Amino acid sequence: MKKLAVYSVQAAAACAASMFAVPAVLAQDAPSAKAGGLEEITVTARRREESLQDVPIALSAFSADRIQNAGAPDITWLQQSTPNLTLQVARGSNSTLIAFIRGIGQQDPLWGFEPGVGLYVDDVYVARPQGSVLDIYDIERLEVLRGPQGTLYGRNTIGGAIKYVTRPLGNEARLDTKLTFGTYAQHDFIASGVLPLSETFSVGGSAAIYRRDGYGENQFTGNQNHYAKSVDAFRMSAEWNPTDALSFRLAADYVEDNSDAKHGHREAPGMGLAAGEVVLPDVFDTRGGIGDDNLVRNQGVSLTAAWELTDAITLKSITAYRDGVTHTLIDFDTSPAPALDVPGYYEDDQLTQELQFLYEGERLHGVAGLYYLDAHAAGKFDTIVGLLNLTIATSGFVDTTSYAAYADFSWDFTDKLSASLGGRYTSDEKEGGVYRQNFTGLYSPQFGNSAAVPGLIRSDYTNDRTFDQFTPRASVSYEFTNSFTTYASYSEGFKSGGFDMRGDVVLTPDTVNGYDPETVQSYEVGAKGMLFDDRLSYNFAAFYADYSDQQITRQQPTVTGSIASFVDNAGASTIQGVELEGAVQFSDRFSLNYGVGWTDAEFDKYETYQVVTNPAPPPATITVPVDLSDTAVFQNTPEWNGNLALNYAQPLPGTWGSLLATVSGSYRDSYHMFEFPNPLIDQDDAYTLVDASIAWTSNDEKLRFQLLGRNLTDEEYKIGGYYFPGALYGNIVNSFYGPPRTVSLSASYRFD
């Protein structure tokens, strides 16, 4: 079902043509207009302010202006602009995040699993992926750090870190508003403002309301909001600077996502209870019968205090509390019949405290810190197998208490040569409980069916474990010239173990012992510099990683209707690759941003279990060990990816303001959804997304209009899937797709 109006695309093309037709002679007396390109971006990747070009790590940074010119809707846009990054909306959800950097991440968003990529909002760690597809508004910049970063950040970041840095309040009154209308009945409103109450105290807030109809419909329920968006987000903050050396920032945020549930698109005809279900012609359509209700709610509060003791020493405290709740309905079989339906409920909360000591001397620079995390994650879900009139009720919790100490210091031997040494000690105490029981009937008592007949208790245990690890980091950098710096580094990453919340003691008795941590040893060399009179910038990195005890989640159906869950420490793998990104400033008006990444990731060993039928009577299923390294592949890790953006600015004559055009393309190679190839749900073809934007800004920069087209070639590409074949579960072969072509027009106005 396509709702795109063709005239919108034609209008975008016409505007682009008219902009380039403006004679340059008319702009001779107009105000200057610069087309992005070589920005001087200050980042805090190493917990201190530095130029992006001076940081000897693989880091991508995006200013508010570049993000605005690209029309980025949320942080998944970073996938289109950052080498070797996968950032997607999780299958079956609207705001749950799937993140991978250089092949390391987390596919399973179930409670209790640790993310492989750390997400930070103003230095506050966000522990759960639910509600983490952050919409971009009132932002200062985004940063993506690739590779282990445990010596610099509060929580373990084995694969890398994403930093969402909001716009500081300052002490000038302002009010910014933005209204957007687009295809699929999109209508968004964003407002942010600051009110100084004194020279040292300001309060501010921002609100964002996002509404959009669905790309498809549920043909069973008649709901036309499949893949729709309904999100409300708010932030409030206060900044107090009683002296030049002392500052406080109190911030609170709230996000509520009421978007309807996504049930996926069937890629193969149904069987069993789902017999007769066919492959629908529109990839955004479904026929799920479990319902369309879905709710994700997240909120948090934080207090950041900084005290500059001397010109060289600063003490900093970051205290934060966050909690969230999710009500979800997952229709695995995408049919009216309950062949395999899963209603679910998740909840989580976290309290974090971080203390930092920052030193900025003449030759010595660095940070040392203490970190504390007290987190609770819990939930429940029913696995409804309609053909057997069976429901498997599952619930559980994981409590985590984490203590860590870290430090990372750099010493400048000369003006050109410097070296850094760091380390992190982490101790994670985890307690987990899992309950799993068979019930005769559809739905169990935990989801309202008091008449369900209780059967075999498959799991009912509580256990605890402690995981300790020291991870070092060392690097050396040399500045050959002011425009050419090289570096080499070694770092280790650590992600603690835990307990499988789907663990079935009947099928896998060892699940009560939990799974072990995973570690990575990463080697990296890089170069950063400028060429051609500082008109071309480049950031290059080559990396090699030994990945050990990799945690992989896998579910396998059994002949008795159960689904065996495995969280394997699969063994060993090797990851290597290169990254290159930068910008070219052809003139004050014309610039280019570019990036390319290559990743070669292979399993050296993959030891897991396989469910088989026991030939001895009575019929039963058992698990046997097996090595699958010959057939296993990395998920969500395309071999090649790249991006290119062209920016052209055109001043208009007199007081007519200026125009800015941005055209971008992002390429992704084919990739797998899970650790074993499956052509029915894998993204088997490479694809390129093309976006274009034309913006007009008034001379006083208060008024701005932007016409934006995303995925202009209407590429059809997959971002997730489910695979439970066979008649017992309705032959589940389902995919979830990225957004189709959309066009929007926004108007922004700044009140002083």
Image: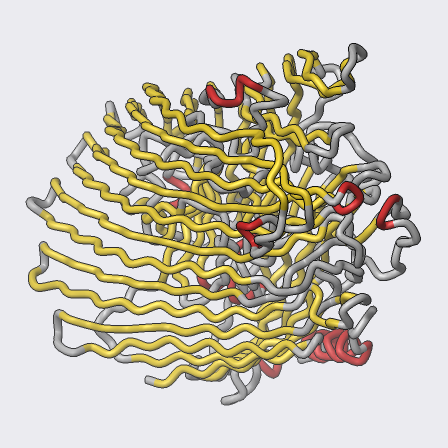
Residue 470: give x, y in percent of width and height: 32, 19
Q: Is residue 467 above or below residue 247?
A: above
Q: Is residue 8 above or below residue 254?
A: below
**Relative to the observer, which residue lies in front, 129 or 27?**
129
Q: Is residue 47 above or below residue 651?
A: above
Residue 598: give x, y in percent of width and height: 65, 32
In this view of the protein, can residue 176 be seen by the observer?
yes
Q: Residue at x 66, y 33 (%)?
A: 635
Q: Residue at x 28, y 23 (%)?
A: 425
Q: How is the image coloured?
A: secondary structure
Quarter containing the N terminus: bottom right
Q: How many marks?
A: 0
Q: Residue at x 56, y 50 (%)?
A: 445
**Relative to the observer, which residue lies in front, 219 or 485?**
219
Does 353 sit left or right of 338 as displayed?
left
Does 12 sit left or right of 696 as displayed?
right
Q: Within the image, what quadrant is residue 251 found in?
A: bottom left
**Relative to the observer, which residue lies in front, 459 or 370?**
459
Residue 594: give x, y in percent of width and height: 61, 48
> Residue lying farthest bottom?
655
Does 149 sit left or right of 365 as displayed?
right
Residue 21: give x, y in percent of width and height: 72, 78
In this view of the protein, can residue 146 be seen by the observer?
no
Quarter containing the C terminus: bottom left
